[in-house]
Image (cartoon, rainbow, N blue to C red):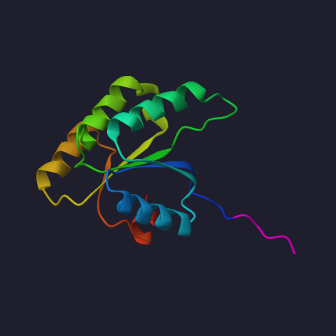
Amino acid sequence: MKRKDPQFKYKYAMLLDDNELDNFINQKIIEANHFASKIYINTGSKSALEFLNNLSISSTDTLDIFPEIIFVDLNMPMMDGFQFIENLKNKLPEKLKNLKLVILTSSVNPEDKKKASEIALDITFLNKPLTQEMLSNL
């Protein structure tokens, strides 16, 4: 009997968090819930921007490998999540049309949520840890 491949909500997703354990746990949650068929993982904002820039150059109409959803931590060294999002908006504005941004953070500061909504109204703000219920609402 042939096994049916699971249906994924997204083809490509990205996790951006400087904490490798958080990335590992979130990756396993995404995989277990068939949320994305491919997960890119980055631990630094600058390297993530470079990676996304390279993906945008490599993507074509027939092979679009750019993530459709990016989970971004706020508190990272050198370039925080807000700076990453601003850089992404400036460097790859054409990709933002089809991209869902999710801030996934341990921050409970209401100012962070306010700042996220000022950057873009369609940014989803979630508190760690990522759960199956959170994924089902995205």
Main SS category, magenta section: loop
Q: Is residue 21 above or below residue 62?
A: below
22 displayed left or right of 9: left
Q: Position of residue 75 (x, y in %)?
A: 22, 49
Q: Is residue 88 above or below residue 109?
A: above
Magenta stretch: residue 3 in it?
A: yes
Residue placed furthest toward the right: 1
Residue under the point 34% across and 42% down:
44
Q: Is residue 47 above or below residue 13?
A: above
Q: Of residues 121 and 85, which is closer to you in this image?
A: 85
Which residues are the magenta region?
1-5
The answer to whether one can see residue 95 in this image is: no
Residue under the point 45% across and 40% down:
99
130 displayed left or right of 1: left
Q: Is residue 32 above or below residue 100?
A: below
Q: Position of residue 77 (x, y in %)?
A: 23, 43
Locate the C terminus by quadrant: bottom left
Looking at the rendered structure, the number of numbered marks drawn on it comes to 0
The answer to whether one can see residue 34 in this image is: yes
Name which quarter of the figure residue 32 lies in. Answer: bottom right
Residue under the point 19% across and 51% down:
113
Q: Position of residue 48 (x, y in %)?
A: 40, 38
Q: Of residues 15 and 19, which is closer to you in this image?
A: 19
Residue under the point 23% across and 38% down:
78
Q: Position of residue 110 (x, y in %)?
A: 13, 55
Magenta stretch: residue 39 in it?
A: no
98 displayed left or right of 82: right
